[in-house]
Amino acid sequence: MKKFINYVDDAIVESLSGLASAHADLLRVEFDPTFVARRVPKRDAVAVVSGGGSGHEPLHTGYVGLGMLDAACPGQVFTSPTPDQWLAAAHSVNAGRGVLFIVKNYAGDRLNFQMASDMLVDLDHLMVVVDDDVAIEHSMHASGRRGVAGTMIVEKMVGAAAEAGADLFDCKALGDRINGGTASMGVAFNSCIVPASGVATFEIGEQEMELGVGIHGEPGRQRMPFAPAAGIVDLLLDPILKDLSLARGREVLLLVNGLGGTPLMELYLLHHHARQRLAEEGLEVVRTLVGNYTTSLEMAGASLTVTALDDEAKRLWDAPVHTTALRW
């Protein structure tokens, strides 16, 4: 294993220290317990807090800032944040109108958040659970569908609403609505290596790919022969389109997300084919984003995410954002 690491146990602390010092104008990082927060807090507004295991950067710490998150709780690599992290972050960024937590649908994330929620009796709070991964049918897994790249889209739109003064219940309703209109599907060509283990999470042949892979290296829908890019786009979009069942003429957002080890050239190639396929289906891509936004360490692969848009969603997506990883 070759990684830029001194000692595995120090990697997250050193990385977060580097993040905070590189962006000292935007962020501050607290340790024991660990969370990242805005340098300049909001006032008289709903605070939006998210988090999850490290290794998916820039999710979630890269989205702390104006128009998005107030704080993010990073766990160890692919490990859920602890309840005390959620509690400390919530109390630190509370701006007087309650806290909305955005949680990816994994058993550990939800369990630890629920424990924190049970202790958070002195602060109004609600939760949005993101479960955009259509690789898993709701009935196939006890925890339901996983939260993947669509999480960033929910964080962006809810963060914009909170920044504009929406109340806690409206932010919660918005998050649930955007999540319900978002679907993602990924594919991997190889495995990542979790630093603590030092070996690949799974083995895959040179001429194989894992369709529907999770962002922690979880198995997908099927292991299948490698295919040309246009064919892979169809394999990813077929279940997305089936899940969303959008009427022709509907406007959508298309996110082409790299999993950490795929060149940007190839991501734009995927965008070209995905946009063509969506046009053939009668869908109008009016917002796009291409790049590494929800990664899985150095895994080679990509995911496609489609979100149904209306005027409110477009306005919230277009609203100003200034974070380390997303700004316009």
Image: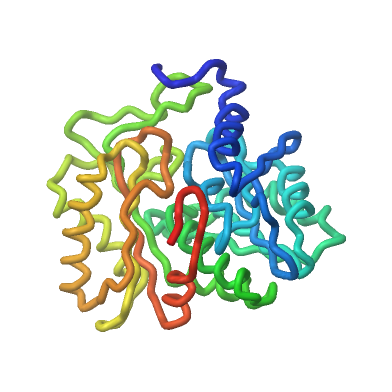
Above or below, 195 relative to 321:
above
What sort of colour scheme is used for the picture? rainbow
Tell me the quadrant of the picture where the N terminus can be found. top left
In this picture, residue 209 sits left or right of residue 258? left
Q: Position of residue 269 (x, y in %)?
A: 18, 52
Q: Nearer the viewer, residue 13 or 273?
A: 13
191, 288: nearer the viewer: 288
Q: Quadrant of the C terminus?
A: bottom left
Residue 294: percent from the left, percent from the top?
43, 47
Residue 211 in view, yes or no: yes
Quarter of the image for residue 226 reads: top left
**Residue at horizontal 45 percent and vertical 76 percent from the top:** 313
Give coordinates of residue 309: x percent, y percent.
39, 76
> 42 or 263: which is nearer to us?
42
Determine the residue positioned at 49% across, 23% down: 195
Given the current orientation, which residue lies at the most extreme front position?
25
Locate residue 142, reporting x and y percent: 55, 53
13 in relation to 184, above or below: above
Q: Residue at x 51, y 68 (%)?
A: 157
Residue at the image position 47 percent from the left and 42 percent from the top: 56
